[in-house]
Amino acid sequence: MSALAASVSPWQRLWSAYVRGTVRHPALASLVPFVPVVALWALVAQSGLFPPVFFPGPAEVVQKFGTLMANGILPAYLEDSVIRLAAGTAAGLALGIPLGLLVGLSDRAHRALWPVLLFFQAIGDIAWLPILLIWFGFGLTTMIFVIVYTVLFPVVLNTVLGVRSVPLELHRAALSLGASKVRVLWEVVLPGALPNIMTGLRNGLGFGWRALIAAEIIVGTSGIGFLMFDARRAGSVVEILLGMIVLGVLWYVVDSWVLAPIERVTGQRWGLVTRHD
Amino acid sequence: MSVPRLVAAAMFVLPLLALLLIWQAVVHGFDVSPRVFPAVGAVFQAGLEAMQDGTLIRHIGASLGRMALGTVIGIVTAVPLGVAMGTNRAVSTFFTPLLRFFSVLAGIAWIPIATLWFGYGFGAITFVIFNAVFFVVAYNTLLGVTGIAMPLRHAAASLGATRWQMLTEVLLPGALPNIVTGVRTGLGFAWRGLIAAEMIATNVGLGYMLFVARDFYRTEVIVLGMIVIGVLWLLIDRLLLSPLERATIERWGLVRAA
């Protein structure tokens, strides 16, 4: 036992302590790797390899975070961005799921709409910005429209896939047991398509997120994207870096508090993933 | 082309033609101002003009050139890095959250700092495309390599596979479906990043063409640009990504051929 202990270097012992710690507190595993990165960042910034104007250190960013929180700019912009994303996503889901059900269930609708859907999906959200600016001007409508558009297509296309993946026997079984068409829709088709709908939502949010940043940069009234681009005009790298970090953290929060729990619930119930106890 | 394929192609084009008719009917019927939405003929006319004076080709060339360069550099650097990080479990558990964080930011969020570091122009735009592809592909490669069953690697090692054979015959093929997924997602982000960056940071390219047309309320040029962007992405998807997916993912039995 003592011979074995002697052959383990302090580094290995530290590592195994870390691994044990991450098992007990999973959040640790996603936080600790950032420590050396931030340290390296501070070191490079300190060394003066790049001019400090172009490459500020973490201390300045934290300080900036403090000031922007204190004067209320960051909370206000963050609220604007999150509300836009949430409203756009909700509208995208409300339009996308029924449309996906229609195209998935009806052959006629599929034949008529599928090529059109593919084409509009290919145009991409950001290419709509110039004409939206002509239609709606620089404002909230333009931004919400872009996000709805971005979220809509991944949701529709994945809902169609999901609906079509529900075996026909299940439809027939439910119908022959006397279920009405509405009940089949509600209790067979929709639950069966749910995992795909979640995939669509995840993809849509990934794209919608980026569309929001682009829209805020170009429309430029408020929001995290605007904060970053305004800072770029003023040449303040500190605020740009702060904006990027806020965006990254925000996505982590949305992912682990909203998307992952829903996916766990839907995926587990349909037996797509096994529960880890 | 065989008759059934011809019919299928016609069935695909028919709804799009119908859309064209509806567009024309609405613009005519409701007397829509060309400053709000152009007529089909005006867009066609704008397309012809832009083809004749060579501007359209120049914009498309600039956009596709940036896209190709950024994508190639991104894939060439991301795949080796992803494999290197994925081979060792300790290294991969360490890097996974980092790469996840950066793949969330990949693309458009880098536009402000890229334009500051590289100035407005070619460098900044190519950098945005590069990092959109790089982080997503590296993250997916890492996931792919760590997802290879350990017994497979042990079996290859105990049968005397050299490191090179391990790399080319176990790790890379095993991670390939994930790499291809990464390339698809990364290209999707890069394409949007390209259009957005061109609106902000350059004087040539499709995004610029659209954004300048907005200044003069030339909706026919905007709609032309949108159609070109849509068609180009469909071509990238059909001619590049779909064959790649067929060749890799279907070979590994993950999706059935349609």
Image (cartoon, coloured by chain):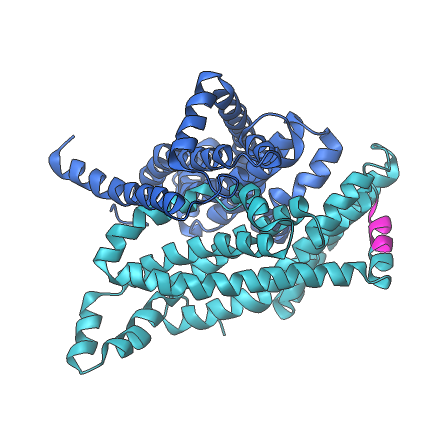
The relative height of residue B212 versus residue B145 in the rendered view (above or below) is above
The number of numbered discs placed on residues in the rendered structure image is 0
Q: Quick one: A85 or A237, which is closer to the camera?
A: A85
Residue at the far left: name it: B3
Magenta-highlighted stretch: main secondary structure? Answer: helix
Query: Quick one: quadrant of the N terminus of chain B?
Result: top left
Residue drawn at x 17%, y 37% is B5
Residue drawn at x 46%, y 47% is B144
User: Whole-percent x and y of residue A159?
Assistant: 36, 60
Q: Which chain is blue?
A: B
User: Whole-percent x and y of residue A231?
Assistant: 79, 44
User: Whole-percent x and y of residue A264?
Assistant: 47, 69
Residue at the far top: name it: B53
Q: Quick one: B169 or A9, which is closer to the camera?
A: B169
Q: Quick one: B84 or B243, which is closer to the camera?
A: B243
Residue drawn at x 43%, y 36% is B227
- Would you say residue B19 sits in the magenta stretch? no
* Colour of the chain lettered A: cyan
- Would you say residue A59 sits in the magenta stretch? yes
Whether residue B96 is visible:
no
Whether residue A124 is visible:
yes
Question: What segment carries the magenta color?
Answer: A57-64
Residue drawn at x 82%, y 40% is A234
Q: Quadrant of residue A74?
A: bottom right
Drawn side of residue B47 relative to residue A32, left or right:
left
Q: Quadrant of residue A140?
A: bottom right
Drawn side of residue A204 relative to residue A80, left or right:
left
